[in-house]
Amino acid sequence: MSAEAFRWGVLGWGKIARTQLWPAMQAAGHQVVAVGSRTPGGAIAELPGITATTYKDVLANPAIDGIYIATPNHLHVPLTVAALQAGKPVLCEKPMALSLDEMEQVQAAADASGCYVQEAFMVAHHPQWQALRTSVAAELGLLRLMQVAFSYDNRDPANIRNAFAQGGGGLWDIGCYAVWVGQWCMGREPDTVRASATVHADWGTDIHCQGELLWHGVDAPTVLQFSVSTQRARHQSVTLVGDSAWAEVVVPFNPLPETVVRLRNPGAIADDAVQTLRFGPVNQYSEMVKTFAQAVREGRAADLSQSRAITRTLVRLRESAGMCGSA
Ligand SMILES: NC(=O)c1ccc[n+]([C@@H]2O[C@H](COP(=O)([O-])OP(=O)(O)OC[C@H]3O[C@@H](n4cnc5c(N)ncnc54)[C@H](OP(=O)(O)O)[C@@H]3O)[C@@H](O)[C@H]2O)c1
C-alpha cells in the first residue's frame, strides 16, 4: 500500500459497502481504515487492518481523508452533515437527499466546511455513459425518446428498500437512475413530469412506479419513459432514439467488467446493421472513488447542482404519483 493511499472511513458496512465499494477502493489503491457501525463488534471487528468503531468515532478519526456513507437513505443527510461539520469530505450513496430541504442542509454544511461532497452515482464514471454523451450522441442526432426499465424482486419486509421510514420504495432506490439518465443525456431538468405508482398496502413504499419526463423542444419534445419495480423479474435496459439512429445500452447500471452499447443505423432493424461498441474491462465504482479522491486532493469545491436537480425531479414525480411526504 502506497504511503499516499487515500484513507477511507465507511459508515454503514452493508451489502454495497462490503461487496462493491471495499473491493473498488482496494483496486484503486485506497485503504479503508475505519468502519462505523451501530454495533461495532462481531464480524466487522475481524476485518484485517480496519478499526471497527462507532459512527461518531469514525468522524473524529484524524487519519481519515474521506467518508463513504452507505446507510439507509433517511440517514444520508444527517450523516453527511455531521461528517462535513467534522471537516471530512463525503461520498454519499444515492439518493443523497429525500427532499430539497435536506439538499439545502448539505449545501449549507459544504459551504461552511469547505469540504468536498459528492453523490455516489457510479454510472457517471463508466465509459459507456461517457460515450453516450459524445460519440454515440453524434450518431443519434437529436435525441427524441429515452426508455428506461429497472427492476428486481425483493419481498423481504426487513430490507431497507421496503421500509417507508428509511426512505424505501422503488422510485427512490432505482427511479433515481432513470432520472439520472435524463439529466445526463439532456443536461438539464425536465420541463414537465408525471408518474403513477402502486404502493404496498402494509409497507407504504412504491413497489411499481412508472412515468414520463418531458423536455420542450423547438419542434417537438424529448420524452423519457420509465418503469421501475421492486417486485418484478430482475431487469435493466435503456434505449435512446434519435432523429438519425438509436442505441441500446445493454446493461446500463450494473454492467459486468466488459459491456457493450449497440448502435442501430438509420432505418435499420436487422442485426447485421448493428454497430457494437465495446467497453472495459472497467470497474465503475473504482473509477468513482479515484475521481472523488482526486477532487479532494485538488481541494475542489462541491457542486451539488446535478444532485439537487435529480432530487427536485424525484420529489415532483412523487407528488405526481400521490406519494406525498417521505421518511
Ligand atoms: N450505488 C449502488 O450501486 C448501490 C447499490 C446498492 C445500494 N446502494 C445504496 O447504498 C445504501 C445501502 O444499501 P445496502 O444495500 O448496502 O443496505 P444494507 O445491506 O441494508 O446496509 C445498510 C447498513 O446501514 C447501517 N444502518 C445504520 N442505521 C440503520 C438502520 N436504522 N437500519 C438498517 N441499517 C442501518 C447498517 O450497518 P450497522 O448496523 O452496522 O450500523 C447496515 O449494514 C442505500 O442508500 C442504497 O440506496 C447503492
Image (cartoon, rainbow, N blue to C red):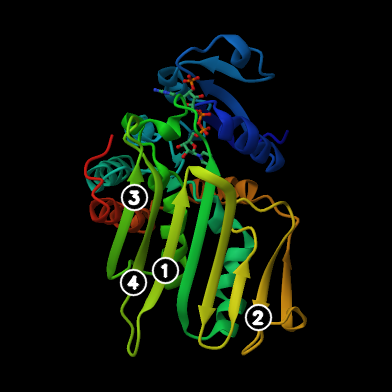
Mark 3 or mark 2: name the one nearer the start of the chain: 3
Secondary structure category for the residue under label 3? strand
Q: Which residue in the protein does label 4 denote?
A: 214
Q: From this viewpoint, is residue 299 visible?
A: no
- From the image, tell me which residue sits under label 1: 224
Mark 3 crowd level (few <14, some 14–19, many ≥20, 10 Å Cα): many
* Type of amino acid under label 2: Arg
Of labels 4 and 3, earlier in sequence is 3
The image position of residue 279, as x and y in percent, is 72, 63
Q: Residue 197 carries which label?
A: 3
Q: How many marks?
A: 4
Residue drawn at (63%, 64%), measured in percent from left and top?
128
Q: Earlier in the sequence, mark 1 or mark 4?
A: 4
Q: Which amino acid does label 4 sit on?
A: Leu
Query: What kind of residue is marked 3?
Result: Ala
Mark found first going from the N terminus, 2 or 1:
1
Choose mark 4 or mark 3, whichever is in front. 3
Instruction: Tell me where residue 207 sits by quadrant.
Output: top left
Q: Are marks 1 and 4 in contact (CB under 8 Å)?
A: yes
Determine the CA span between mark 1 and mark 4: 6 Å
Name the residue: 52% across, 78% down: 241
Query: How far apart, in angstroms, are the residues tagged by discs 4 and 2?
Result: 24 Å
Distance CA(mark 3)–CA(mark 2)? 33 Å
In the rendered image, the vertical position of residue 250 relative to residue 202, given as above or below: below
The image shows residue 63, relative to residue 99, as above or below, that is above
Question: Residue drawn at (71%, 41%), measured in percent from left and top?
Answer: 27
Q: According to the image, label 2 marks what residue?
A: 264
**Three-letter amino acid code at disc 1?**
Leu
Mark 3 vs mark 2: in front = 3
